[in-house]
Each structure stands twice: as C-alpha cells, then as structure tokens.
Image: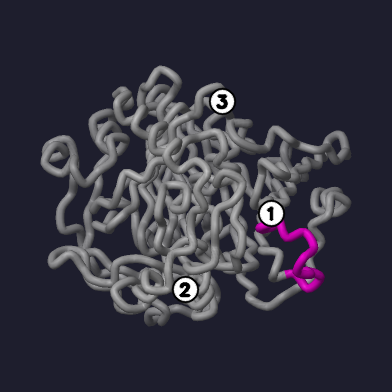
Amino acid sequence: MKLNKKLLATGVLTASLFAGQAWGAVSAQEAAKLGDTLTPMGAEKAGNGGDIPAWDGGLSEPPAGYKGDGIYVNPFAGEQPKFVIDRSNVDQHADKLSPGQVEMIRKYDNYRIPVYPTHRTATYPKKIMDETVANATKAELVSGGNGIDNYQDATPFPIPQNGLEVIWNHITRYRGGSVQRNVGQVTPTAGGDFSVVKFQEELVWNSYLTDYEPGKDDNVLFYFKQSITAPARLAGNVLLVHETLDQVAEPRRAWLYNAGQRRVRRAPQVAYDGPGTAADGMRTSDNLDMYNGAPDRYNWELIGKKEMYIPYNSYKLLDRGLSYDEIIQPGHINQDLARYELHRVWHVRATLKEGERHVYAQRDFYIDEDTWQASVIDHYDGRGELWRVGEAHAVQMYDQDVPWYAIEALYDLLSGRYLALGLTNEENTPYSFDVERQSRDFTPAALRRAGTR
C-alpha cells in the first residue's frame, strides 16, 4: 500500500503555514473547558451516544483480588468480545482501523481483532491533572517546535492546535514519575523461533530526584537506564540516556557500557533511525515507546480526530501465568490474548522533510485522547510502501493512576517478522513505582556498576 502523495504535499504546506508562529498557550476561556466539557487531560468528556461511554473519572480503585503487589488483576475478566474483525468482515470495519491493521488482517489468516465493550479507564493523580490544566495557558512550543517553554511535569498541550503539540503530549506524558521494571523483548523469525532479551529499566523524571535543582539541567526531561540481564552473551551491557527537551539545541545525551570491553562510550547513534537495543534490526531507536526523541526531521500535520478500534485494557497480556510461547506466534502475538475497544484518537501524519534522512518517509500516528499514548502507528518506507505497523496494548495501572503499555509490538509486513517489547512472566518482578523524590545515580560513571551487578 502506497502513501498518499497529495496528503504528503498537504502536510508540507501545513507545516510551512505554522512556521514562525508561537504555538500552544490557549486562552483562559478555552482552557475553562478542561474539567467541564473536556476532561482535565483534554479528552472529550461525553460519549458518542453509542459504544463510547462518557468519562466518569477513570479506574483508580483496584478490583477484587488485587493484593497491591503490582501483579495486576484483570478487572474485565468476565467479558467476552462483542464481535471479531477478520478477513470475512474487514472491509465493513476498515473505516475504524488503520491501513496497517487492515493489511495485517489480509496478510495473516489468524490475525484478528476481538472488539470488547469500551471502558474509559484512564486517570491520573490530581497533581498531574492540575498541572495539565495550568499548562494549557502557559506552555508554548519554541525553537521551531523542537522544545517546550513554561512547562511543568504533566501534559503540556491538553487542547492541541496542531500535530506537533499532539506528539509532544505523547513524548512528555506522565508515566509515574519514577519507575523500575523488568521486561523481555523478542524478535521472532518468520517461522516463530525466538529467544528472549531481558532488560532491567529505570525511568525517572528530573523533578523526582532529590538533587534536582530548578534552573540546573532544565533541558533534561527524564533519565533512562536500560541494563541487559539475559542472555549471557549480552548481559551487563547498559544504555544510559539523559533525554533533553530540545534535542536540536542540545542533542540527547547517551552512553553505552560494553561489558566485554569494560568501557563507557558516548552513543550519538541512539537517536532517530539508529538501531534499537538488541533488536536484530527490527526497530529504530525512535520506535521505543512507540515514538520518542527529537521531532525535527519531520513535518507534522494534524489530520483530525476519529473513532478507531485500538488495543486497550489489555490485562490478559500481563497475566504472569502465561509463558512466552503462549504469547509469541509466527507473524504476530497471539491475538486471542489481545483486547480492542472503540476509542477516539488523534490522527497525526509525519512526513520526512526535504533534505532529511530517516528510514521511515511517513508515519501515521493514532493517539488515544484519554492518555495521549500512541496506540497505533503505520510506518512507510522511502518508496511510499506500507512497511511496519506498531500497536501498543494499553493498560491502566489502577494502583498508581498511571496509563502504560503491557506490550509494544512492531510488525514488519515485508519480512514477516516482528518485535514485541514489555513481556513479563513469573520470572520477572512487577513494575515498581515511587512517587517520592529519591536519590539515583544517572551519571556515566554509574554505568560500569550497573553492568557488573
């Protein structure tokens, strides 16, 4: 499937019309909609009069059986699919799917989309919602849209005026402040054979560190450390990232510790379409978290809002009783474990700027209105052919008021292979959140210690 060249030109024109303007910071009158007709995070409060219900505050009370240990109980375990989309009826539902999802159904006879009742479970801590409301009249894009000014920890643009603001909402969205997790990544062959790479990760926003001082290192959004714990041939390798807000003015700071060489090196390749960690060429650096990093290589067009079937409330995929073999299949994850719901999404199109380089010439983002998480992304190659389809299977971590992903999957339509990241099972410790400020060492000198633990 080829990208639409007419729409490509429209995206470039839209970007040029915005050039030189200050973006963001809506009026107080417009911001007054937050908490009224809009949720505090900027989604439409009302339902659609049908399958999408009104937002009633989200899911912040754990279901019966939850022990408070981060092993999440499925609050919708008794529900059955309303219907399933497959080859027999995909044309009937194509208007509520991305082109990539449609192609997945056509390519694989066992890739199907089970559609369940919609639950708007997303919610956040009151502090984050209050800060989001405050950002609406203050936060602005600067440096040609490559940075944010007058911004505090939360969503910067709850009432977005253009596609780039929607993307910044995804990049900066609240993920718990300080998080540690143990997850697995697989890159199966086309026949389904795979081995698991296991990561121990830490993600901390600067304001959650005890030694953070406002005015010092303010261009750092968060700190990220990723240590490989298995297999043995990769164990001990560590990636450290200081994620900067304006990566054009100050590129992302990244270092790699190679356990075999016992050396720490700067890693400028950990950006854009540089290779993803231990991904066997199946993702780029900016495919992590569905999309991350500097947006300067693309023009961004806000296509609008639409209703779409997206992965949502995917608690089955967090079942620690599942083995990797039960989740991973040839071509795609086990869709019997997936759950899709009808939600409203923001559709944003990114087209590569003239003179810039990236393996993806166009990306179409479908971003959930309640969480600002990218739910589905279609990726096109330099020929305009649909190449990869990203799906993020979202969950609400109801004990922390944090939306997150159970699994990120990136499907390669050309090779028949894919990558799945976020896998957990009985071998892994649960996610760990800490909302209190704490002391953590995210200096390059700490990499050697992380690799030899």
Secondary structure state at the residue bearing disc 1: strand
**Label 3: which residue?**
356
The numbered mark, 1 or 2, whose residue comes first in the sequence reads 2
The residue nearer to you, when weighing 112 against 439, is 439
Stretch of the chain drawn in magenta: 209-222
Residue 442 image position (x, y, % from top left):
79, 57
Residue 203 image position (x, y, % from top left):
65, 59
The numbered mark, 2 or 3, whose residue comes first in the sequence reads 2
The numbered mark, 3 or 1, whose residue comes first in the sequence reads 1
Give the amino acid type for the residue marked by disc 3 in the picture: Glu
Within-10-Å neighbours for mark 2: few <14, some 14–19, many 20+: many
Give the amino acid type for the residue marked by disc 2 in the picture: Val
- Position of the N terminus by quadrant: top left
| Whether residue 389 is visible | no
Q: Residue at x 80, y 53 (%)?
A: 450
| Magenta stretch secondary structure, dominant | loop
**Label 1: which residue?**
224
Within-10-Å neighbours for mark 1: few <14, some 14–19, many 20+: some
**Label 2: which residue?**
133
